[in-house]
Amino acid sequence: QLQIVESGGGLVQPGGSLRLSCVISGITWYDYAIGWFRQAPGKEREGLVCINGLDSSTYYTASVKGRFTASRDNDKNSGKNTIYLQMNSLKPDDTAVYYCGAEAGPCADYDFDSWGQGTQVTVSS
């Protein structure tokens, strides 16, 4: 059974950094694309980053490219995948609930069909 659990959100000042973590279990890692998206109040869901399972090629949306870095760690023994999102130079516009997502197959327009409960990131002075 696929399970996704995010952690690491919080309050940070503009210009600061945060690192989000996500543990995904119940998937065959090379069969799935995993990544992050966010949703701010009153705004549409915004895909941020996607990592292909097969070759770890990584795609970023323009608004976070150069500021956010995603990485993954696969534990073949436990079957758990951990994906991280290092967020630097944070801006108030980055305030949102951040979700870790997964989709079977390769990355496709950040169209994750499974996600966790989300973690709140607030950027404010």
Image (spheres, rainbow, N blue to C red):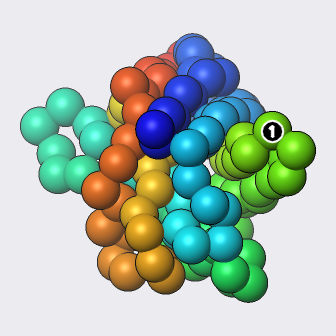
Q: Is residue 115 left or right of residue 16?
A: left
Q: Is residue 79 above or below residue 12?
A: below
Q: Foreground: 19 or 95?
A: 19
Q: Foreground: 103 or 41?
A: 103
* x 66%, y 62%: residue: 29
Q: How far across and how far down the image is residue 83, in percent?
A: 69, 48
Task: Choose top left, top right, bottom left or bottom right for residue 70.
Answer: bottom right
Q: How far across and how far down the image is residue 101, in percent?
A: 44, 50
* x 38%, y 42%: residue: 115
Please state the total of marks drawn on the protein image: 1
Q: Is residue 21 above or below residue 57?
A: above
Whether residue 63 is visible: no
Callout 1: 10 Å neighbours few (<14), some, many (20+)?
few
Q: Which residue is mark 1?
A: 78
Query: Amino acid under label 1?
Result: Ser
Whether residue 1 is visible: yes
SS at mark 1 in the image = loop
Q: How far across and how far down the image is residue 25, in percent?
A: 61, 40
Task: Choose top left, top right, bottom left or bottom right for residue 99.
Answer: top left
Where's the C terminus, which quadrant?
top right
